[in-house]
């Protein structure tokens, strides 16, 4: 656990003393008392997506994300909601939507960022030009102070220059009295006003927000009531420990949203055009530069969101308008375009509405993770990514910024919040080298001086943490910095709350993830990793935590985290544990650590991360690699051998299928047999068909056909268990006029071996298949598969697994190895299959997508072919992984998690459907899980279309 919490989304790494997951406020009080007694510290943590090392440190990490996640109260009449710090921002807005409200600030991490962290960092997001920062929305907090006492901070009226506070808590009263005393000195007030960032800069997170306190009574007559929440927001958990937060909420915005995505030749043009855009009062104005646009080309998930991009622009400015009607937005967009063209700015002005707007924001929000896609050791580093200046200063500031980079032989990525004067700028640095470490510090110093020149804020929304704290004296002056240190000592005299952040921070180029000059061995791996090695692939994870989203946000990644809410079950945790041991292990076999195995255990190999992780971390591939190396030293468990030997065992059992079925179709016998092999006794087992598909094929009377040749891949699941589905695939294709052939007998996919990490055996199968099929499979004569996980091995794993001399042939073969759905959809597009060949009956189909189809292929073909019958309506079930994932859901220790995953979305949705609704699922494991979890029989798309053929 300490290893998993040693990093966040920043460049920092430091092992905590311990990790605590408190369940109650009493637990928190116990932790505070423990920290005081043992002179250690507490580091509050929610999603761990901070970019300045805020939750990295040597104390006790206190993770409140799992148990402090309740929405406690909502008051629509007064427009507020009260929550615990572990409530996810997007999930809060899902809750608020029926009331007609939302919590405005929106970070790019909003589907996993939590309110406690947003308060700690004073988060803003893309729409801050409308909603401001989190600080503007915090009405009241309940907190535990450094002595363990409880306090409530909210609006407090000033009476004769003092704040009326209940004397029941002397420590709380002392905080108020001393704060008023410190800020009452006219010289201090002048020092603050003279040296803090320009008032016109809305994003201002430099140090403690003592300047904001001066806006209230008693320092500004007629100002708002004094509220220490202004100070607590942005304090990064260094002053107190929040237990409840009362937030102001806004009415929902107008329903119509339009995005004008203006294309420019350069970032400079975009920033000058931004000043024009802001005159029309948009709800957001966001920059995407050419580096990020290039990264989207290699992202499976984001490639499809590039549909609006014309050519290769130097930058795109996404300007959002929210109005009551589309016509109002069209008028505004036309005015924006006219003014920009008149200024000679921009060359393409697409205006997007509806579902397309979500795709654009998904692409923009993916920027942080996409930057980790750079192969090798050079990365776009978070070091100067959070500067904010006045928008009118922004073009000149960025020009000066880039001049500094060029003088130092560096370049940077530019993206994000042009509308509020904050561009996230990331220089590309190799922190594994001495020179990279030197550049990390040098560029931080240079840019800090530049920000001060423009009287800007070194931190706009990401906070100071341990990254920028060192430069706060430069930004606000030594006197104001001394005042901040006094504020910290006032609230936390024993320094137990997140020390080393904001004030008294260690040097910013220490405690980094990578040690300058670090050496790691060359790894002999079974998979190839394009332009990198296995360690570098794990290092692509930058900690952004996309794998921490819940099922409410959709998608597949990461099903085990969704079910358990444990950090240990995230893709991030698995990448962290691999990086740690592959970098620092002293063993000859650096994979052979039980700690890695423990963290990898609940990875379902669903492939969700391959598509949904913006850094494209393929954890399934990494787990398979790990298992093979681990087994080489530790030995292969018997159950893993049995599962990997699926084909051989079924071949023997198929000699007497009635005997096998007699055991596994009899509950009492099945439960005994399951226990013997390590399967859960409540899990039913797939039965064997009376004859194998290959046996049926040999004996059948083939339908004469002169049509297009199709080679059917009768995988091991179709051959032994799903024979009837295989027959219907053949019958359907022949009825549609295709010449169906088998490319060989008893072909295996290697999916069982891959699923258990037996890569040596899988490689033998892959090599054999590629050699056998490479000369007969082509675009004209494709290989069509029934089971998605089997046929997609040709496209996904084979090219990186086969012998090097077969890699090119494997890649070609993979392109022409199609799922049943892909093949039929291609034929539909070519007008070779027509709706009139199917029934006109009206039916509703609920479709559950196979994980590997979603990751490596798409569900679009599935929906297209199931919609072939004119009156068939197809609705996607918004489920991620079903929870079975091959053998995972059978295994005794994984059964409960497997069923929890199913219960999140899939099972409840299926149970609600009337019997006449067809449940569709292409995956054999998916259909089995649906049967065990709901009692319903799900059908393969081929079965549905076979039944739908016009009679």
Image: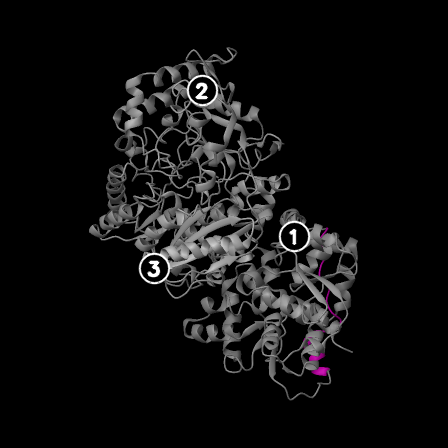
Whether pointer 2 and pointer 3 mark residues with C-beta atoms closer than 8 Å, the reply is no
Location of mark 2 (residue): 37
**What is the magenta segment's predominant secondary structure?**
loop
481 sits left or right of 629 in the view: left
Q: Which numbered disc, 1 or 3, marks the residue that appears first in the sequence? A: 3
Mark 1 is surrounded, within 10 Å at the Cα level, by few (under 14), some (14 to 19) or many (20 or more) other residues, namely: some
Q: Nearer the viewer, mark 1 or mark 3?
A: 3
Number of numbered discs on residues: 3
Report crowding for label 3: few under 14, some 14 to 19, many 20 or more residues within 10 A (C-alpha). some
Q: Residue at x 33, y 23 (%)?
A: 485
Q: Secondary structure at mark 3?
A: loop
Residue at the disc numbered 1: 678
Q: Residues within 10 Å of mark 2 (few under 14, many from 20)?
A: few
Task: Determine contact: label 1, label 3, CB under 8 Å.
Answer: no
Dot 3 corresponds to which residue? 314
Instruction: Reply yes or no: does residue 688 show up in magenta.
Output: yes
Disc 2 secondary structure class: helix
* In the image, farthest residue toward the left: 407
Q: CA distance from mark 2 to mark 1?
A: 47 Å
368 or 880, which lies in front? 368
The segment highlighted magenta reads 682-699
Indicate which disc, 2 or 1, sits on the residue closer to the N terminus. 2
């Amino acid at each position: 656990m300490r290893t998993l919490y040693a990093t966040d989304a920043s460049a920092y790494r430091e092992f905590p003393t311990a990790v605590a997951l408190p369940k109650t406020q009493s637990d928190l009080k116990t932790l505070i008392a423990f920290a005081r007694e043992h002179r250690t510290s507490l580091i509050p943590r929610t999603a761990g997506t901070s970019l300045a090392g805020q939750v990295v440190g040597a104390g006790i990490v206190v993770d409140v994300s799992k148990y402090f996640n309740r929405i406690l109260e909502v008051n629509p009449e007064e427009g507020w909601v009260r929550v615990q710090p572990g409530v996810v921002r997007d999930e809060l807005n899902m809750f608020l939507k029926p009331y007609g409200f939302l919590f405005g600030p929106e970070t790019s991490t909003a589907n996993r960022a939590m309110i406690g962290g947003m308060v700690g960092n004073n988060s803003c997001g893309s729409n801050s030009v409308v909603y401001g920062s989190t600080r503007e929305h915090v009405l009241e907090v309940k907190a535990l102070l450094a002595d363990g006492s409880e306090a409530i901070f909210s609006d407090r009226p000033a009476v004769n220059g003092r704040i009326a506070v209940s004397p029941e808590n002397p420590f709380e009263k002392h905080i108020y009295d001393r704060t008023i005393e410190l800020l009452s000195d006219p010289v201090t007030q002048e020092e603050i006003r003279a040296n803090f960032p320009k008032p016109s800069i809305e994003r201002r997170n430099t140090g403690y927000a003592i300047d904001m306190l001066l806006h209230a009574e008693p320092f500004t007559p007629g100002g708002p009531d004094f509220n220490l929440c202004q100070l607590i927001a942005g304090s990064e958990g260094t002053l107190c420990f929040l237990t409840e937060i009362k937030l102001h909420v806004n009415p929902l915005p107008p329903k119509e949203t339009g995005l004008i995505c203006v294309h420019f030749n350069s970032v400079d043009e975009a920033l000058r055009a931004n000043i024009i855009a802001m005159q029309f009062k948009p709800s957001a104005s966001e920059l995407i530069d050419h580096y990020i646009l290039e990264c989207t080309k290699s992202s499976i998930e984001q490639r499809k969101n590039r549909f609006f991009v014309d050519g290769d622009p130097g930058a795109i400015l996404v300007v959002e308008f929210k109005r009551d009607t589309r016509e109002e937005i069209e008028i505004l967009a036309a005015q924006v375009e006219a003014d920009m063209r008149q200024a000679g700015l921009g060359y393409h002005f697409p205006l997007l509405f509806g579902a397309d707007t979500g795709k654009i924001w998904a692409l923009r929000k993916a920027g942080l993770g996409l930057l980790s896609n750079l192969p090798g050791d050079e990365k776009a580093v978070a070091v100067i990514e959070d500067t904010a200046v006045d928008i009118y200063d922004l073009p000149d500031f960025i020009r000066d910024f880039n001049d500094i980079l060029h003088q130092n032989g560096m370049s940077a990525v530019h993206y994000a919040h042009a509308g509020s004067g904050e561009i996230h700028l990331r220089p590309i640095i190799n922190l594994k080298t001495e020179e990279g470490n030197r550049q990390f510090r040098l560029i931080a110093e240079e840019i800090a001086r530049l920000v001060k020149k423009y009287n800007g804020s070194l931190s706009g929304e990401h906070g100071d943490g341990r990254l920028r704290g060192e430069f706060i004296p430069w930004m606000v002056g030594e006197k104001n910095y001394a005042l901040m240190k006094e504020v910290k000592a006032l609230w936390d005299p024993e320094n137990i709350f997140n020390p080393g952040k904001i004030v008294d921070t260690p040097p910013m180029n220490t405690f980094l993830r990578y040690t300058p000059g670090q050496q790691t061995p060359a790894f002999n791996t079974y998979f190839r990793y394009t332009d990198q090695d296995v360690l570098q692939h794990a290092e692509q994870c930058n900690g952004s935590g996309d794998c921490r989203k819940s099922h409410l946000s959709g998608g597949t990644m990461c099903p085990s985290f969704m079910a358990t809410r444990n950090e240990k079950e995230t893709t991030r945790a698995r990448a962290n544990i691999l990086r740690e041991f592959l970098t620092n292990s002293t063993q000859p076999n650096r994979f052979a650590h039980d700690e890695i195995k423990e963290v990898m255990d609940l990875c379902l190999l669903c492939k969700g991360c391959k598509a949904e992780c913006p850094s494209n971390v393929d954890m399934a591939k990494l787990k398979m690699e790990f298992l093979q190396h681990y087994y080489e030293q530790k030995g292969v468990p018997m159950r893993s051998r049995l599962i990997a030997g699926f084909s051989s065992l079924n071949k023997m059992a198929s000699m007497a299928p009635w005997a096998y079925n007699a055991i596994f179709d009899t509950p009492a016998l099945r439960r005994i047999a399951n226990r013997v092999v390590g399967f859960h006794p409540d899990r039913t087992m797939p039965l064997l068909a009376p004859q194998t598909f290959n046996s049926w094929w040999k004996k059948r009377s083939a339908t004469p056909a002169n049509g297009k040749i199709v080679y059917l891949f009768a995988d091991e699941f179709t051959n032994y268990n799903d024979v009837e589905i295989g027959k219907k695939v053949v019958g359907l294709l022949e009825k549609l006029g295709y010449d169906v052939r088998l490319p060989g007998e008893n072909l295996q996919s290697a999916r069982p071996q891959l699923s258990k990490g037996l890569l040596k055996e899988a490689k033998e199968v892959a090599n054999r298949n590629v050699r056998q099929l490479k000369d007969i499979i082509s675009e004209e004569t494709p290989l069509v598969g029934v089971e998605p996980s089997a046929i997609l091995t040709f496209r996904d794993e084979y090219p990186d697994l086969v012998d090097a001399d077969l890699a090119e042939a494997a890649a070609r073969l993979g392109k022409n190895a199609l799922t049943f759905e892909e093949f039929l959809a291609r034929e539909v597009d070519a007008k070779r299959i027509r709706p009139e060949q199917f029934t006109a009956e009206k039916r509703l189909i609920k479709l559950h997508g196979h994980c590997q189809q979603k990751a490596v292929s798409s569900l679009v073909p599935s929906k297209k072919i199931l919609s072939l019958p004119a009156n068939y309506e197809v609705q996607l079930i918004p489920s991620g992984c079903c929870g079975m994932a091959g053998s995972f859901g059978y295994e005794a220790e994984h059964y409960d998690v497997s069923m929890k995953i199913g219960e999140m979305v899939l099972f409840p949705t299926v149970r609600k459907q009337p019997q006449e609704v067809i449940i569709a699922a292409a995956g054999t494991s998916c259909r089995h899980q649906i049967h065990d979890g709901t009692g319903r029989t799900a059908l393969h798309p081929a079965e549905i279309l076979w039944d739908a053929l016009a009679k």
